[in-house]
Amino acid sequence: MGVAGPTDAGQSAPPTTEVLRVHGLVKRYGELTAVDGVSFTIQPGETFGLLGPNGAGKTTTISMIAGLIAADAGTVTVAGMGMGPSETAAKRHLGLVPQELAIYPDLTGRENLNFFGRLQGLNGKDLSRRTQEVLELIGLADRAGDLTKNYSGGMKRRLNIGIGLLHRPTLLILDEPTVGVDPQSRNSILEAVEALSSEGMAVLYTTHYMEEAERLCDRIAIIDEGSIQAEGTRDQLIKLTGGVDRINLHGSGNSTAAAAALRLVPGVQHVDGDGSALALTVHDGPSVLAGIVTGAANAGMSVTSVEITRPDLESVFLHLTGKALRD
């Protein structure tokens, strides 16, 4: 699926095998339009990211997808079934992990999982087996007998994710699952999410952390002010910026002659020179780097350091919205 904005609201949707289809979602609160025409799909085994700053409309969007609130316009289909506040059949296919913790502090980790598992229809040996599987997946098997009020913030968040996984949902929704956790727990959460997609589970992951989206997501929708600005794979999104890299050279010698020579190197778009430093704009920096260093040396510049800066999702967001991702 290529880079695209929101789907045309008048376009009819062809038959699909998608786990999730979101089409033209709108949510208004008085004069504020919190979500404005959001559309995307998620395939089986795919991790799909909603990347945007706080207040961009991510949580409102997933609240409509999960049937917690009604949309003012648009449709949501989960596993081929329509979703809404009263649609219980579709909700059985969902696992929702909200930002707010939903665990009982005076129960152990295992007791929390057993309790919520019974609410989800699990019992007996199947519940015991599934609880142990989830404890191992979220890295809490060795702390399963501890009261959760004694867990760290990161451990509580990992348990929160485990609760959403117990009934083997077709689609797992994770809303900013790493906010406020320590680096070790954050990495454990990311590793657990990576394992889910390899098992065939579809995941909808909201975040304002660019590095998480780049690490986890097969496709990413950049959302800002309630609208999807662009959607696609990381590489497809990067192309929206022109896909150019920057190479900074530092050294001594004849940098003026080196700048003139480097402007003739294939793949080099632009060269700026300032004393002992040269800044180049190039296509595919790694492939042209050797030629640049050789060209600079042949022109009389002795290069002492090289730095390559490649565009990232922060660059894409800035390009699309004119502001930094975390503004």
Image (cartoon, rainbow, N blue to C red):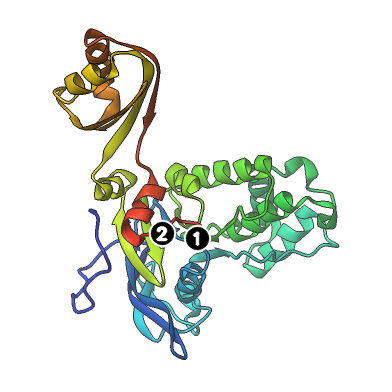
User: Percent from the top left, x then y, of residue 116?
Assistant: 69, 65
326 horizontally vs 45: left or right: right
Residue at 45% from the left image edge and 81% from the top image edge: 84
> Front-most of 258 and 89?
258
Residue 246 falls in which quadrant of the image? top left
Residue at 35% from the left image edge and 41% from the top image edge: 311
- The quarter in which the N terminus is drawn is bottom left
User: Percent from the top left, x then y, of residue 203?
Assistant: 46, 55
Residue at 72% from the left image edge and 55% from the top image edge: 156
65 horizontally vs 103: left or right: left
User: Percent from the top left, x then y, of residue 155?
Assistant: 72, 50
What amino acid is at disc 2? Lys
* Separation (CA) of disc 2 from disc 1: 7 Å
Regarding mark 1 in the picture, which secondary structure is present there?
A: loop
Within-10-Å neighbours for mark 1: few <14, some 14–19, many 20+: few
Residue 227, label in figure: none
What amino acid is at disc 1? Asp
Regarding mark 2 in the picture, which secondary structure is present there?
A: loop
> Front-most of 31 and 235?
31
Please give the residue where the numbered disc 2 appears in the rendered image.
323
Within-10-Å neighbours for mark 2: few <14, some 14–19, many 20+: few
Task: Report the number of numbered marks.
Answer: 2
Please give the residue where the numbered disc 1 appears in the rendered image.
327
Looking at the image, residue 98 lies above or below residue 193: below
Residue 310 falls in which quadrant of the image? top left
| Proximity of marks 2 and 1: CB atoms separated by less than 8 Å | yes
Residue 23 appears in the rendering: yes
16 horizontally vs 249: left or right: left
Looking at the image, residue 176 lies above or below residue 181: below
Looking at the image, residue 139 lies above or below residue 74: above
User: Percent from the top left, x then y, of residue 63?
Assistant: 51, 74
> Front-most of 137 and 324?
324
